[in-house]
């Protein structure tokens, strides 16, 4: 396709809101250029996505595919936020069960391109059989994808310690790797067993089978990693920008939850408040929660904490704040245990720092508002994000035990104070201020989407000749 006629693009993200939201952001950028997007997911997930601006609604079609019943998966669970960690394996089996209905949809919808996530290892073959150009759209950074084995390499990593150093195919010095406690927490999920398809296998298959790797990143941020990704896998790696989250609310639809939050934030001094949130999936253990709480208390800093006590109704391990915590900190702290509008909170002038799990959507949101970062990871890809932020002096990690990942209240308090108010933390505050110029540059970030669409136009397979256009 040499002209810029209308494209039809199908998107199939993994069943996690940390994946679906970036996919939706890219869909909105594509729709703004007049192209059609079919966004495929399960009914409850689609119903929970943010509202679309009215001008984009005609271009984005939501396609609801019902998840099959899988033994072990709680009723009505359709996203990772609905289930405890040990139930996510059943969600992946249900997701794999969408192969047949998705194939039928693709057969009848005749798209130019199919964009899919890390999990559907079976989808590249489906796309090729149907003559559809296809791309792995990674919401992970190129640095995170470095742990995916190039097809030409034989896998040599068999034990957790093998993942605590950069892979042999990384050709430059780097600290972007797992800590031992991080890989120990997820080793079985990453490597799999006889009954489960491992995450590494899923990722390797989608990278190997796709026509192009599309990355939520930009050249100015991680040039060496983007180059390595392309070099190692022998196919184009195209950055689409950071895809900062956007929200649509008409003036009469301001969230009720925001009013009381704003009222509290308005009373705080500019840049004084630590915002604490760990995303839609990460849930600390009770011991970790206690140390975070006491660390906030001992820091003496004002804080606003969005606390997730459980992952879905099937989660029986509900975590609770230490006795008397809220009473002791009520003069300078606020705890919210329900949904809270993160973008609005981060944009408020009283927020100075962000204690975060290092999920990339949250990081991008924080940096565009110039909020200093204190890092505390819980899940897999967050580890690589945190290492890269550490390398670039964009975030300070709370010190932890290398073996079990434990941390204490004193290190939490000291880390918060270092980044928020101490002179030695100035390097982190200044670096975020510098990077805001890149992350918040809408024109620069938008140009990546433009370049991506140019690529889609020029490399889409011809309907008459399925081998044309892709190289």
Image (cartoon, rainbow, N blue to C red):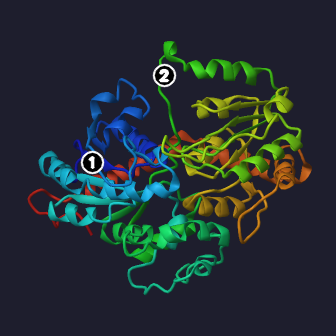
Q: Is residue 154 above or below residue 83?
A: below
Residue 113 falls left or right of residue 401: left
Residue that lies at the very extreme toward the front in this rendered image: 316
Packing grade of label 2 (10 A; few <14, some 14-19, many >=20) is: few
Residue ID for mark 1: 10
Residue 285 falls left or right of residue 17: right
Q: Earlier in the sequence, mark 1 or mark 2?
A: 1
The x and y percentages for residue 353 are 75, 41
Residue that lies at the very extreme toward the top in this rendered image: 252
The x and y percentages for residue 168 are 55, 84
For the question of whether residue 398 can be seen, the reply is yes
Packing grade of label 1 (10 A; few <14, some 14-19, many >=20) is: many
The one of 97 and 434 positioned closer to us in this rendering: 97
Residue ID for mark 2: 249
The x and y percentages for residue 109 are 16, 45
The one of 68 and 392 positioned closer to us in this rendering: 68
Q: Please, what secondary structure does the residue beneath circle 1 have?
A: strand
Q: Quadrant of the N terminus?
A: bottom left
């Amino acid at each position: 396709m040499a002209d810029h006629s209308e494209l039809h693009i199908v998107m199939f993200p993994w069943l996690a809101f940390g994946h679906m939201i970036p996919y939706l952001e890219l869909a909105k950028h594509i729709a703004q250029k007049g192209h059609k997007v079919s966004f495929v997911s399960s009914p409850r997930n689609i119903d929970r996505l943010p509202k679309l601006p009215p001008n984009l609604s005609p271009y984005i079609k939501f396609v609801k595919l019902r998840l099959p019943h899988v033994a072990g998966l709680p009723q009505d669970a359709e996203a990772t936020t609905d289930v405890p960690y040990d139930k996510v394996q059943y969600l992946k089996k249900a997701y794999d069960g969408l192969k047949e209905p998705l194939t039928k949809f693709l057969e009848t919808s005749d798209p130019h391109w199919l964009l899919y996530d890390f999990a559907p290892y079976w989808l590249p073959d489906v796309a090729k059989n149907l003559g559809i150009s296809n791309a792995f759209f990674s919401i992970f950074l190129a640095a995170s994808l470095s742990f995916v084995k190039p097809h030409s390499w034989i896998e040599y990593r068999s034990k957790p310690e093998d993942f605590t150093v950069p892979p042999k195919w990384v050709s430059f010095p780097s600290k972007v790797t797992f800590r031992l406690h991080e890989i120990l927490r997820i080793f079985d999920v990453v490597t799999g067993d006889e009954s489960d398809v491992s995450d590494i296998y899923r990722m390797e298959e989608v990278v190997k089978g796709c026509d192009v790797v599309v990355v939520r990143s930009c050249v100015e941020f991680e040039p060496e990693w983007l180059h390595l990704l392309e070099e190692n896998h022998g196919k184009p790696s195209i950055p689409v920008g950071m895809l900062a989250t956007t929200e649509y609310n008409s003036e009469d639809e301001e969230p009720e939850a925001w009013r009381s939050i704003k009222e509290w934030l308005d009373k705080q001094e500019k840049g004084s408040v630590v915002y604490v949130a760990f995303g839609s999936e990460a849930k600390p253990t009770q011991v970790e929660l206690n140390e975070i709480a006491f660390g906030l208390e001992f820091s003496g800093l004002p804080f606003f904490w969005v606390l997730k006590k459980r992952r879905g109704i099937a989660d029986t391990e509900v975590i609770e704040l230490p006795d008397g915590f809220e009473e002791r900190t009520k003069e300078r702290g606020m705890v919210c245990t329900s949904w809270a509008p993160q973008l609005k909170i981060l944009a408020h002038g009283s927020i100075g720092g962000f204690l975060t799990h290092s999920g990339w959507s949250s990081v991008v949101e924080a940096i565009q508002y110039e909020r200093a970062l204190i890092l505390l990871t819980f899940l897999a890809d967050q580890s690589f994000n945190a290492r890269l932020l550490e390398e670039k002096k964009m975030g300070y990690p709370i010190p932890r035990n290398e073996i079990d990942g434990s941390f204490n209240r004193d290190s939490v308090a000291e880390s918060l104070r270092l980044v928020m108010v101490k002179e030695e933390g100035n390097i982190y505050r200044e670096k975020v201020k510098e990077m805001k110029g890149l992350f918040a540059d809408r024109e620069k970030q938008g140009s990546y989407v433009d370049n991506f669409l140019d690529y889609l136009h020029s490399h889409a397979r011809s309907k008459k000749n399925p081998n044309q256009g892709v190289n």
